[in-house]
Amino acid sequence: MNADTLLFVVAPYVALTLAIVVSVLRWRRHPFSVSALSSQLLESKKLFWGTVPFHWGISLILVGHFLALITPRSIELWNGEPIRLYLLELTGLALALWAGFGLAVLIYRRVTQARIRAVTSPMDVVVLSVIFVQIVTGIWIAVGYRYGSFWGTSVFVPYVRSLLVFQPEPELVAALPHVLKAHVIAFWTFLALFPFTRLVHIVTVPIGYLTRPWQRVVRLQRERWVYHPGSPRPIRKNR
Amino acid sequence: MTPGFRRFVFIVALLLAGFASVGTAVGQEDGKAVYDATCAACHQAGGIGVPGAFPPLADNPDAADGPYVESVIREGLSGPIEAPGGTFNGEMPAFGQLSDAEVAAVVAYLATLADREVGTTVTTSGQPAATDPDRGERFFRGSTTFANGGPACAACHAIGDGGQFGGPGLGPDLTGVVGRYGGPAGINAVLLSPPFPTMQPLFSDHPLVGGEVADIVSYLEGFEGQQPDRGIDVLVISGVAGLAVLLMLTVIVFRRPRPPYIQKLRSLA
């Protein structure tokens, strides 16, 4: 077995199996652990500039990738006119930069804020690193190997489809430049990590979070929680 | 290389090839398979070559010179060369993707071709009568799709002063490519069966057909003698401008003043 088979055939199947099986197990056995583990209460100003650009940017880009996978022909026909191709590529690049800006803020916040560092697990660092690689290689490809929306429908779409129908064709990606391969490998890594980390919150499809006001912390003025001597838990006490 | 030495190499290679063909019939078949997949696009099946562009490998003593052939495969070759059948001026890229075993197999296979008489020389200089550069441009850009569903050239390649909005594509710039491949016949042969590892899997199931190739070649010929000119990087500049717009939207749309939650609850009641 050569490296290409390992990276572009074995790795995706292992990653896909882990993503599905472990997600289902986690959902059934530890349903309350399926969470993004918000740290908004610990720090919220920087979080706004990180989470809003990152989540909007990355979601729209994922929708674009998914559209190409399910209907590549429509994208090819759209791209047949240079001006339309330019608009699509420009939109993709701007969204990627937006998501990258948000991720940079999130990483900065996690590293510099003591309160956030205190709740950071090693897996959070791994997750941020993998997404960072994914976004940097994505921007690199958009700028340095132009028109991914155009050649991607002939290179990556048949490759992913070949995996989904269990007739893998790794030769489609094996001869590509290293940056493109890194983008693919980072995605399989992302998929494999997904059920073991806070990324698992994606399975809840939290679409509503994209449109609701980004902060809604409700304080009940008329009651408070106090610790009584000898009580392990706080109890509610009306004023 | 003197003719005498060349003949000597030729005979040694012939003997080696003879031993090889007796000893490793499997290896020779592999060599033919590699040749058909990688070399035949330009040098044609059976090694008959393309006049003016790609020299014949059958009935060509140079093709039996193992070390020479190997170095050409490894490093590529460009510029005019003399070979049986006249002068040839195609451009051969380096084929780094071939393994040592594959190169050795091709070298062995070529040695068996070198002494083979070429019965008929195919002339491909006669282009099909009606080629349409405008239709070629539509194929190139992708506004007219290929019959077998292959990807448009512009997906990966820029040409002249247009194409990638000021930046590099996935594939090389095609300005002046017809000359680099020794004229229309050469580029025609390449497009009908691309030898490059990136293009091969894309077009093996979706081959171009003769009329399409002829139109594209006539479009490509219009850029002969020009220099690639991409100007300023429009995509990057407008992408950064797009980021600025999105950051403004972030403030306008999401940082709006929020009404107290109690208001929403009252409105629901």
Image: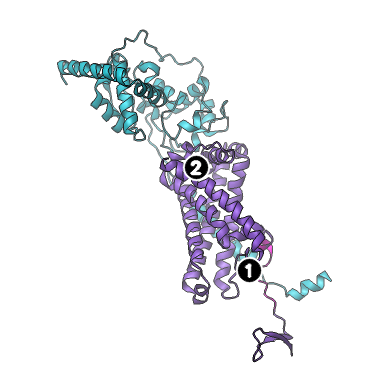
Chain colours: A purple, B cyan
Q: Amino acid at mark 2?
A: Val
- Screen quadrant of the C terminus of chain A: bottom right
Which label belongs to residue B211? none
How many numbered circles are shown? 2
CA gap, disc 1 and disc 2: 45 Å
> Where does the image place residue B168, in percent across and percent down from the top left?
43, 43
Residue pictured at 24% horizontal, 19% vertical = B16
Local crowd at mark 2 within 10 Å, few (<14), some, or many (≥20)? some
> Where does the image place residue A52, in percent across and percent down from the top left?
59, 63
Q: Is residue A44 above or below residue A169?
A: below
> Which sits in the foreground, A115 or B94?
A115
Q: Visible in this render: residue A194?
A: yes
Q: Is residue B4 above or below residue A86?
A: above
> Where does the image place residue B61, in percent across and percent down from the top left?
25, 17
Q: Main secondary structure of the magenta part?
A: loop
Residue pictured at 62% horizontal, 45% vertical = A67
Q: Chain of mark 2?
A: A
Q: Amino acid at mark 1?
A: Arg
- The image quarter in which residue B184 lies: top left
Q: Which residues are magenta?
A: A209-218
Q: Chain of mark 1?
A: B
Q: Is residue A111 magenta?
A: no
Residue that carries the numbered disc 1 in the rendered image: B255
Q: Is residue A232 above or below residue A188?
A: below
Q: Visible in this render: residue B234?
A: no
> Which sits in the foreground, A140 or B1?
B1
Residue A195 lies left or right of residue B89; in this view the side is right
Residue A208 lies left or right of residue B209; in this view the side is right
Q: Secondary structure at mark 2?
A: helix
Residue that carries the numbered disc 2 in the rendered image: A9
Residue pictured at 31% horizontal, 33% vertical = B100
